[in-house]
Every structure is written in structure tokens, then in C-alpha cells.
Image (cartoon, helix red, strand yellow):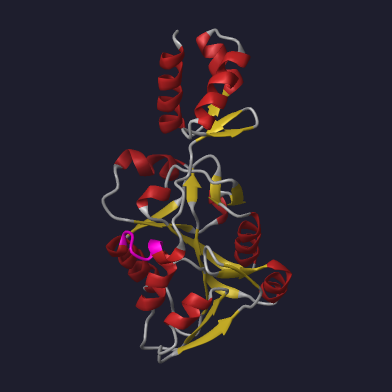
């Protein structure tokens, strides 16, 4: 099999399975594992996949900065935010993650009853400046400017002292095998801590984040109550998540 044919097959398998295991593929093609590993190294250098121990994962798309992300998929994010906001009940303590999708959620929060919003995002807190019924608690710490959220020891200490009824989490990638992930180590740890102190965690996902894997794992999919995704996604896109028994809400 030619190198170009192997690389085309690797691309197809990544799309279908979400991962490549070098030893398994080498055995299937009756090739040496070194040959497959060399192909994976070359494809990683070309920006076509992400090398990991023993194989490869799909690349998660690089995120533009926060200001640029606010202009992307605005209708999709507004629909996700509105659907998530409808889950909130009077008197609840709700933790809102940072990010542009949760900013859309903040703008859709109910105004007919009182509840508490806890967030480690100054951007989210500012969205709620004029909200008539939401009490807002802002968690401090070192500011991660890319996502406009706080992190570090100060943030983790504050998070450890809260108990939330609902956590609406944002991620950069969600994969049936590799779970929920993001691009920053400290941000992943912060999200994990929040989820550990929330009764229920829902994950808001725009379409391009499905079937992707980012470098830092947050949680397995089973740790979340479910996923909130856009309406109209292809059946085959959601099938691997449904097969795992993940609750999926379409917005």
C-alpha cells in the first residue's frame, strides 16, 4: 500500500472511529508498527492529526480569541443558551462557565424569579449587571485571558466552598471515547472542580466541537447529566453518544 493510500485510510478511520491505535492498524494492514507510527508523525507535522501515546486523535479546531468568538455561530449559541436557561428553577444556585456560548445563556436567564449565579468569568458577571432577579457571585483568581475566566489556587479554594444545583459547562471538544476536554491544563482542572461541586452538570456544545479531542481531559462523558446540542445534526453525528446512553437535548 502506498504512503498516500495509508494516510487517506488513516484520515477516514479518524473520522469514523475518532482515534487511531497504531498497533491495531498495523496488524490489520499487515505492516510494521513503525510504518504506521511514521505516517502518524508525518501527518501530525502537517497539522492533520494529534499524536498521542500509541496512536493519534483528531485535531480540535484552534480557537480564535474571545472577542472573535463572540461573532461566530451566534444564532446557534443563542438557541443553546435559551434551552439551557429553561432548565433553571426558582431559588437554585447555578454555576455558569466562561465562554461565548454561556454568555448567550447569561443573556437568556429567566427574569421572573430569583436565583443565584456563581461564575469565575468577569465577562459573564458583566452580562448580568442589569439582571433584575439574579444574585451574582464572582469567583476570583488568576485571569486566563483567552477564555476570560479565573483559575489557580484562589479560584479552586473558592469553588471548593460552594455547592451548585446546576453547572453549565463549556468545552472545546467532546468525544465518545475521550470525553470532555479543553486546551488548557489549569482550565481543565477548574472545570473538573466545579463539576465535582455541582449536583448536575450540563455541557453546551456547538456543532464543530463534537467528535473532537483537545489536549487536556476534563471528565468522561458519563460524568455529565447530558449534552445540549443544536437541532438538526446528522443522525450519525449523535449516534455514538446515544449508544453510550448520554442524555442529549437538542436546541
Q: Residue at x 61, y 49 (%)?
A: 216
Closest to the observer, 198 or 185? 185
Which residue lies most toward the bottom here? 132
Asked whether 210 or 2 is in front, the reply is: 2
Q: Quadrant of the N terminus?
A: top left
Residue at image coords 39%, 68%: 84
Q: Position of residue 41 (x, y in %)?
A: 57, 26
Q: Is residue 69 magenta?
A: yes
Q: Is residue 225 above or below residue 10?
A: below
Q: Position of residue 200 (x, y in %)?
A: 54, 66
Q: How many marks?
A: 0
Q: Is residue 112 above or below residue 220?
A: below
In the picture, residue 89 is in which quadrant?
bottom left
Quadrant (top left/top right/bottom left/bottom right) for the C terminus? bottom left
Picture quadrant of residue 229: bottom left
Report the residue at 41% width, 66% height from top. 67
Front one among 30 and 215: 215
In screen coordinates, is 79 left or right of 228?
left
Considering the whole magenta stretch, tell me its main secondary structure.
loop
Q: Return the x and y of residue 136 as percentages of the image width and height.
A: 52, 85
Whether residue 171 is in magenta: the answer is no
| Start-end of magenta stretch | 68-73
237 is higher (above) or lower (below) than 3 = below
The percent position of residue 23, horizontal first and vertical second, equals 61, 19
**Of 75 and 180, which appears nearest the observer?**
75
Q: In the image, what residue occupies the spot 71% across and 74% down?
A: 154
Specify whether 117 is left or right of 112.
right
Residue 158 in the figure: left or right of residue 126:
right
Amino acid at each position: 500500500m502506498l504512503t498516500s493510500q495509508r494516510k487517506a485510510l488513516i484520515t477516514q478511520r479518524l473520522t469514523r472511529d475518532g482515534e487511531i491505535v497504531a498497533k491495531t492498524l498495523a496488524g490489520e494492514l499487515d505492516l510494521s508498527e513503525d510504518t504506521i507510527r511514521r505516517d502518524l508523525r508525518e501527518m501530525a507535522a502537517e497539522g492533520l492529526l494529534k499524536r498521542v501515546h500509541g496512536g493519534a486523535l483528531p485535531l480540535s479546531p484552534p480557537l480564535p480569541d474571545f472577542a472573535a468568538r463572540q461573532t461566530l455561530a451566534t444564532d446557534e449559541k443563542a438557541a443553546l443558551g435559551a434551552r439551557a436557561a429553561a432548565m433553571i428553577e426558582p431559588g437554585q444556585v447555578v454555576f455558569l462557565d466562561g465562554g461565548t456560548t454561556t454568555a448567550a445563556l447569561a443573556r437568556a436567564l429567566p427574569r421572573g424569579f430569583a436565583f443565584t449565579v456563581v461564575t469565575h468569568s468577569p465577562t459573564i458577571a458583566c452580562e448580568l449587571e442589569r439582571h433584575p432577579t439574579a444574585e451574582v457571585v464572582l469567583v476570583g483568581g488568576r485571569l486566563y485571558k483567552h477564555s476570560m475566566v479565573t483559575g489557580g489556587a484562589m479560584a479552586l479554594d473558592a469553588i471548593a466552598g460552594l455547592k451548585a444545583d446546576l453547572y453549565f459547562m463549556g468545552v472545546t471538544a467532546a468525544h465518545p471515547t475521550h470525553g470532555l476536554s479543553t486546551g488548557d491544563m489549569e482550565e481543565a482542572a477548574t472545570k473538573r472542580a466545579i463539576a465535582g461541586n455541582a449536583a448536575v452538570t450540563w455541557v453546551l456544545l456547538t456543532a464543530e466541537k463534537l467528535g473532537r479531542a483537545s489536549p487536556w481531559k476534563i471528565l468522561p462523558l458519563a460524568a455529565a447529566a447530558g449534552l445540549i446540542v443544536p437541532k438538526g445534526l446528522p443522525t450519525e453525528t449523535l449516534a455514538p453518544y446515544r449508544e453510550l446512553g448520554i442524555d442529549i437535548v437538542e436546541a
